[in-house]
Image (spheres, rainbow, N blue to C red):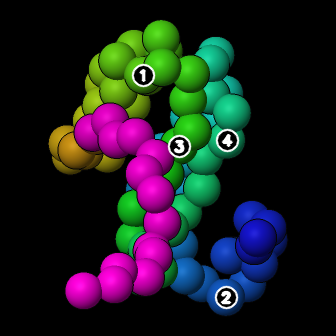
Amino acid sequence: ALRKSDLISMKVSCKEIDFLVDLAQKFEGVYGSRLTGGGFGGCAVTLVDEGSAEKLQNHLKEAYEKHTGMTCNCFVTSPANGACLITL
């Protein structure tokens, strides 16, 4: 996994995503948060205790809008089976 210093030196993140990741990592119930996607913004993925997910979404949306003047989209998803071979 890339460290924050790697992301900064490669310039694949942006201050808005960094803000969300840092904010999420400080929230109770969060196990980890990081940049993912195509880089140069991408998106953040945060692993959070199910009981804290809604509170975290509200916290991120409110703080992000206050900090940037923009809104952010958050959604909850669950892990699923990965890629597999299907025999037809």
Q: What kind of residue is marked 4?
A: Gly
As helix, strand or loop, the secondary structure at mark 3 comes to strand
Please rate how many residues cluster around mark 3, counting C-alpha atoms within 10 Å: few if below 14, some from 14 to 19, many from 20: many
Badge 1 is on which residue?
Answer: 53
Q: What amino acid is labelled 3 in the image? A: Thr
Among numbered discs 4 and 2, the one appearing first in the sequence: 2
Task: Decide whether the magenta segment is chiefly helix, strand or loop.
Answer: loop
Q: Which residue is mark 2?
A: 10
Front in this rendered view, residue 77 or 74: 77
Pointer 2 or 1: first along the chain: 2
Query: Which mark sits nearer the N-terminus, 2 or 3?
Result: 2
Q: Position of residue 13 (x, y in %)?
A: 53, 73
Kindly report which numbered mark, 2 or 3, lies closer to the viewer in this rendering. 3
Mark 2 residue element: helix
Image check: 87 left or right of 31?
left
**Over which residues does the magenta segment extend?**
75-88
Vertical comparison of 34 with 88: above or below: above
